[in-house]
Amino acid sequence: MSTGPVGGGGDNLKYALLVGAAFVGGITYAVITIRGDQERHMKRIAEISSRKQKSATKQPATQLHAEPHAAESTKMEALPEPKSVAPPSPEDSSPPAEVAAPGAETAFPSESAEPPAADSKPVSPTLPSHAPYLLIGGGTASFAAARSIRARDPGAKVLIVTDEADLPYMRPPLSKELWFSDDPSVTETLRFKQWNGKERSIYFQPPSFYIDPEDLNSAENGGVAVLTSRKVVHMDVRGNKVKLDDDTEISYDKCLIATGGVPRNLQVIERAGEEVMKRTTLFRKIEDFKSLDKVSRNMKSITIIGGGFLGSELACALGRRSSESELEVIQMFPEKGNMGKVLPEYLSNWTTENVKKEGVKVITEALVKTVSYKDDKLEIKLKDGRLVKTDHIVAAVGLEPNVDLAKSAGLEVDSDFGGYRVNAELQARSNIWVAGDAACFYDIRLGRRRVEHHDHAVVSGRLAGENMTGASKPYWHQSMFWSDLGPDVGYEAIGIVDSSLPTVGVFAKATARDTPKAATEESGTGIRSESETEDTASSAVASTTPAPPVEHKDKYGKGVIFYLRDKVVVGIILWNVFNRMPIARKIIKDGEEHADLNEVAKLFNIHED
């Protein structure tokens, strides 16, 4: 017998009708909403298409072009992006593979890269108001960071802001290979033959690699955009935004400062007046290369002040050119010989003699007292009374790290080395990293340092990019640098190479293979650090060949120079010895005392023919 209430069936019927009506109403609402969304979507697509068709008729000089999809990028020989590797455990003291070995994949330009059209006219783009990854500076460190970010975050939207008018490019050829080109249009093409005979551009990638800044926010797959001829003048760290020199504001999630440095000048030149300054080159950028090239073809005399890497490279380059013209090339510096602050005195003197053989008049122990302009000539008066007359001056007296943003950003500048102080992960503050010349970092072996070399810019930029995407990796890498005094004499160095330190040099007789040109021909690479691998160091075997007696010891054909601090090797120069840098890196990393450095030198096989 049923115990349910009378009339329950009628209530159930009403409930079912109500549910059914609600269901039908929901379906109707969903259909209307979807149709509305589709209409709005189609309108949006039409607007974007119309905008791109309009922008296609423009040729902006302050922005670049769309990054191609993967299938297209392979046709341009685009550099592969670095693979991410899990960070090492605290017990593992070995450097991460991708940090220890700066490979060609990230460090060097595509051979197909071309400069932007020379006749393009500036057009003010509609700038994005927000960039998830903002990179300040358009040099090697920034480019390496951009590639690293995109490798770990394939959909990342990266905006590079640079005050230069050019796309990211590498600087070393500006004082090296470009000067030895036999192409009369090299200042326009900016393509050159490496010592191994292969041709390439100084640009890391062609314009088509990049995306327009105005399209960055709407790019479905992200990309890298470069905003040229714009300078960041203020940072609001709390608000995560920056202000450009035209008062445009751009906010960011993560920011990299890679502002590099600016060439120093002598105060006596700065005080000498406009006529002297107009005839003085501070060599750093593409425009400086073009300007000095023109000067060297139209003037009768050029004087280079500075005996370091840049000054000596330019002296040799211009000296070679003087053999084909009536150009007089003079180099002066306060030291007793070329690269006197780096090389031991005997090797510095030997280098000076070789620079003279290139057609350069070298004036040593030269301290500039005054510079003036008289009778269409620059007059350089030295403190010892000597007077040098010339048409043009190149001041190659060092680099000042660009720390203009330190005050507004509240970032600490190192009082000893200059540059922004960063931690082991290259971080200066929350969401702010620094890489390249402007970074003052802590070296776990050699203490706090600031390095101004290409290899350091590559590796620090790449690591900063990884850490901006959450890698949290420390900077373990011992960066190297190289310098060539033409195709026949060159060296590679690592660590602290300071001529004030005790040194031990082990030399052997050089062969035809012991030149920068021969080394690049054998390795197939144009930039020697491209071929570095950490694995080489672990498999190195000392040569069993006894050291032969070296004839003409004053010639120092090839060898290894060890720099010591507290009896421990802290720096190494490989003099006309190439592709052995991983071995040098391991010696410094081990930090051990060595009873006989002649035995250590055998690791480099310098006595093998």
Image (cartoon, rainbow, N blue to C red):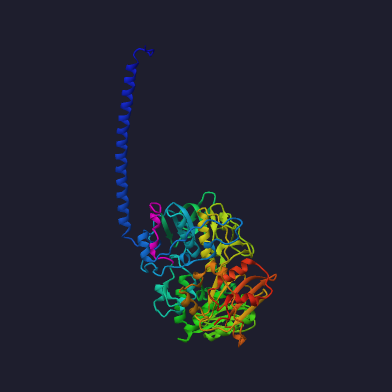
Q: Quadrant of residue 25?
A: top left
Say if the magenta span includes residue 443.
no
Say if the magenta span includes residue 208.
yes
Majority SS type along the magenta span: loop
In the rendered structure, the answer to whether residue 560 lies left or right of residue 230 reads right
Q: Residue at x 48, y 62 (%)?
A: 144
Q: Assign the C terminus to one quadrant of the image.
A: bottom right
Q: Residue 543, percent across and down?
A: 59, 77
In the rendered structure, the answer to whether residue 40 lies left or right of residue 542 reads left
Q: Who is closer to the viewer here, 510 or 257?
A: 510
Q: Residue 437, percent across and down?
A: 55, 65
Relative to 86, say whether 504 is above or below. Answer: below
Stretch in magenta:
204-221
Residue 110 appears in the rendering: yes
Q: Residue 219, percent across and down?
A: 38, 53
Q: Quadrant of residue 324?
A: bottom left
Looking at the rendered structure, the number of numbered marks drawn on it comes to 0
The residue at the far bottom in this view is 552
Q: Residue at x 32, y 37 (%)?
A: 33
Q: Assign the N terminus to one quadrant of the image.
A: top left
Residue 376 appears in the rendering: no
In the rendered structure, the answer to whether residue 252 lies left or right of residue 575 reads left
Q: Who is closer to the viewer here, 472 or 166?
A: 472
Q: Who is closer to the viewer here, 398 or 3?
A: 3
Q: Residue 509, percent across and down?
A: 57, 84
